[in-house]
Amino acid sequence: MSVNVSAGVSGSFLVRPNVSDQAVDQIFRETDLINVLFSQGQVEESSGSQPFIWNIIKEANATAAVFTEGAALSTFGNQLYEQASLPAFYVRAAGGETGHMRDNRLKNGLYQDIRALEIEKATADCWKKFEDELCGSTANRGIASIVDAADTYAGLAPATVTQWASLETAVGGALAVTTLQDMYETLVGSTYGASPTHILAPQNQVTNYINVAGVPGASNAAYRTMLGGAFDAGVILPLVTFNGMPVVPVRGLTSTELYMGDVSKLKLVMHRMPTVTDIAKTNDDETFMVTLAGALRLERRRSFGKLTGVTA
């Protein structure tokens, strides 16, 4: 009988496995918020120790007034100040390879460098965990607590420093253009004095915003599907804006919230960029730890607002 590749037949032992060299990543590790801040030049390394401290002006000089000719100058005033103090938080991931696996790697017996791969993915896991914290609601870490009308942030409470409060609007229903208009109008008004540049929203709220114009191609749509050329019944996401502001999908955000604000006032301060440290040996394994540290610093809380309770 001719040699063949049937399982268990001698010829099958001679067939070289056709395995791709690279492992294909199936894990979601995207960091949309961090990417936005990088793209806007709002990620910086700290220049000194943490906590990160900055001074804020909470009240103006109350002596500013109209005066008449010859009026006596009897009162003197000044700006009133407070100091915000924000601690960095740390994230880590640990991994390694056994001595036996190391021998295989050094003898070119692996499809790829497993140690390098483990370090690469552990670093990505650290960034993803960092992103999860930034998109969450933990005090001093997550944007849901940082952009807030009541939560204490950087050591200051809006209950005592009233100017240290973001705009917060409880919607309790579907997203509407009028809601966004009211939010924008309030933010740019004399109370908040903001200059919003972006809307940050989970993907479902980006879709909800697109759909306020009606279902594309339907009779109630404010726009129509264009005929001729390429057909696309959706919307080109990079072109989605409101009052000229990009509406940016941030998939880690809570599905019922949406943020509007001046991204130039929002900085990701990195106290430790991703660092790989070898762990002291306790056996034949080669172990390591990836770490990073930083904090999300909103220098002017009144430059941001959020909608909560928006129908998902």
Image (cartoon, helix red, strand yellow):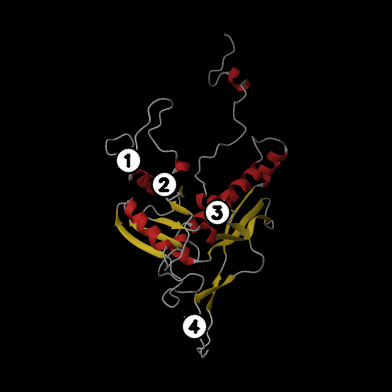
Mark 1 near mark 2, Cβ–Cβ under 8 Å?
Answer: no
Would you name the residue on which mark 1 appears? 222
Q: Earlier in the sequence, mark 1 or mark 2?
A: 2
The reply to whether residue 267 is visible in this rendering is yes
- Report x, y in % for residue 170: 33, 61
Q: Earlier in the sequence, mark 2 or mark 3?
A: 3
Q: Earlier in the sequence, mark 4 or mark 1?
A: 4
Q: Earlier in the sequence, mark 2 or mark 4?
A: 4
Residue type for callout 2? Gln
The quarter of the rendered structure image containing the N terminus is top right
Farthest residue, direction top = 1
Q: CA distance from mark 4 to mark 1?
A: 52 Å
Q: Earlier in the sequence, mark 1 or mark 3?
A: 3
In front of the other: 214 or 312? 214
Residue 37, which numbered label? 3
**Does 270 appear above or below 119?**
below
Would you name the residue on which mark 4 appears? 63
Disc 3 is placed on an element classified as helix
Would you name the residue on which mark 2 appears? 203
Residue drawn at x 62%, y 46% is 120
Residue type for callout 4? Thr
